[in-house]
Amino acid sequence: MKQKIVLATGNQGKVKEMADVLADFGFEVVAQTELGIDSPEETGLTFVENALLKARYASKMSGLPAIADDSGLVVTALGGAPGLYSARYAGVDGENADVANRAKLLQALAPMAQDKRQAKFVSCIVMLQSERDPSPIIAEGECFGEIAFAEKGENGFGYDSLFFSPEVNCTFAELAPAEKKKMSHRARALNVLKQKLHK
């Protein structure tokens, strides 16, 4: 019988990307939005702290084990921005947030030459058995690349159309979903989680 676990996110892109993988691990995944749970205020100063905050809140409100991902884009030339504020970089909520965030990033990097546009995607996944679990499982994954000068590709979400990966010689938005699922920062963090769960 599969273990039921709450996924602490309202981001449908993350739900889609993570639920398939977690189902393979033997979990029955329910998104917190399906249970009417909102997201808590993210007051942490690191991806780990924010993931813990989200997982503890979802577990508290649902009474279920919880898994949370906090992830973002870290651009070296911008001092690590958008970083923890990747989802709300342009201060816009809702459907237009991704478009506004990408526009702001392109504007911020407009004067930068290609060799100054290094970036990485970071994902930190936390799993808790209960709200007060003192020993959370923490798994992290990173992908290195650079910010393109213009958007390319129709797949993915967030900053995918601007994140050029030398590893695959295209943006993440140009990858088929199955390909991205194998090598994204979140895929790498999920792989670490899988290894830790099977120890």
Image (cartoon, rainbow, N blue to C red):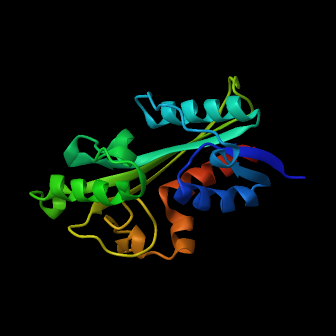
Residue depicted at 68% across the width and 62% down the height: 20
110 relative position to 8: left or right:
left
48 relative position to 26: left or right:
left
Residue depicted at 25% across the width and 47% down the height: 76
Q: Which residue sits furthest left?
A: 111
Q: How many marks?
A: 0
Quarter residue 98 falls in? bottom left
132, above or below 104, in the image = above
Q: Looking at the figure, which quarter contains the C terminus?
A: top right
Which residue is more in the foreground, 82 or 98? 98
Residue depicted at 60% across the width and 56% down the height: 15
56, above or below 183, in the image = above
Residue depicted at 60% across the width and 61% down the height: 16
Which residue is more in the foreground, 116 or 1? 1
Which residue is more in the foreground, 45 or 33? 33
In x, y percent, where is residue 180? 51, 68
In x, y percent, where is residue 143? 42, 56
In x, y percent, where is residue 133? 71, 26
In x, y percent, where is residue 41? 48, 31
